[in-house]
Amino acid sequence: MTIDTKAYGQVEVDERQRITIPFGLYGFESLSEYILMDARQRPFYWLQSVDVRDVAFVLIDPKVIRQDYDADIEPRDFEALELEDSDDERFLQFAIVTIPEDRQDMTANLQGPIIINKESRIGRQCISRSDRWHVRHNILEEMASTGKNAC
């Protein structure tokens, strides 16, 4: 399938990259169909709306930033995605990244992770019950504090 993307223009994508988020993302509740793509710069991904070219999100696996990350989401969120827990082999999680003009200030939302069942390709944005995680974690600072290389 061909899709018009914000980052790369027209690209050919595999139907297996399609992710359905039935209730949308916070602030984008009316958009439920997305394509999950690798970004050209690791360790990032793109979550591109199928319906609106200009709606796309940069994502990162929170474990890249914080190896100790545990979203601590409600059991009903796992149930809705037909997942046992975060150890389920079908479990994927991402954090939405905000990239301001000064990339040193790039942040990840660890409070509102996107959880996906990679088998069914159904996802949802959840809210962490932990007060450890916030909407803006500076990615470069978090990675420097754990001794990881910067992006």
Image (tube, rainbow, N blue to C red):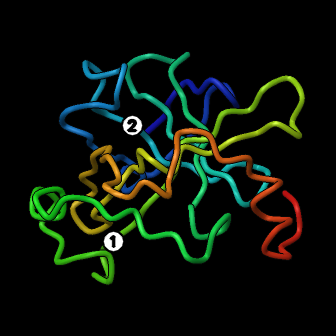
Q: Residue at x 28, y 31 (%)?
A: 24
Mark 2 or mark 1: which comes first in sequence?
A: 2
Give the quadrant of residue 6.
top right
* Callout 1: SS: strand
Q: Which residue is mark 1?
A: 91
Assign the C terminus to one quadrant of the image.
bottom right
Q: Residue at x 58, y 42 (%)?
A: 46
Q: Position of residue 31 (x, y in %)?
A: 30, 23
Q: Amino acid at mark 2?
A: Tyr
How many C-alpha atoms fall within 10 Å of the one at disc 2: few (<14), some, or many (≥20)? many
- In the displayed structure, 116 sits above or below 87; it is above
Q: Count the marks.
A: 2
Front-most of residues 2 and 142: 142
Q: Position of residue 112 (x, y in %)?
A: 41, 44
Q: Which residue is mark 2?
A: 34
Q: Amino acid at mark 1?
A: Phe
Left or right, 1 with respect to 151, comes to left
* Callout 2: SS: strand
Left or right, 96 with respect to 123, comes to right
Q: Residue at x 89, y 40 (%)?
A: 104
Q: Position of residue 80 (x, y in %)?
A: 11, 56
Give the quadrant of residue 29.
top left
Check residue 142 in the rendering and tell me which mark sits there, or answer none. none
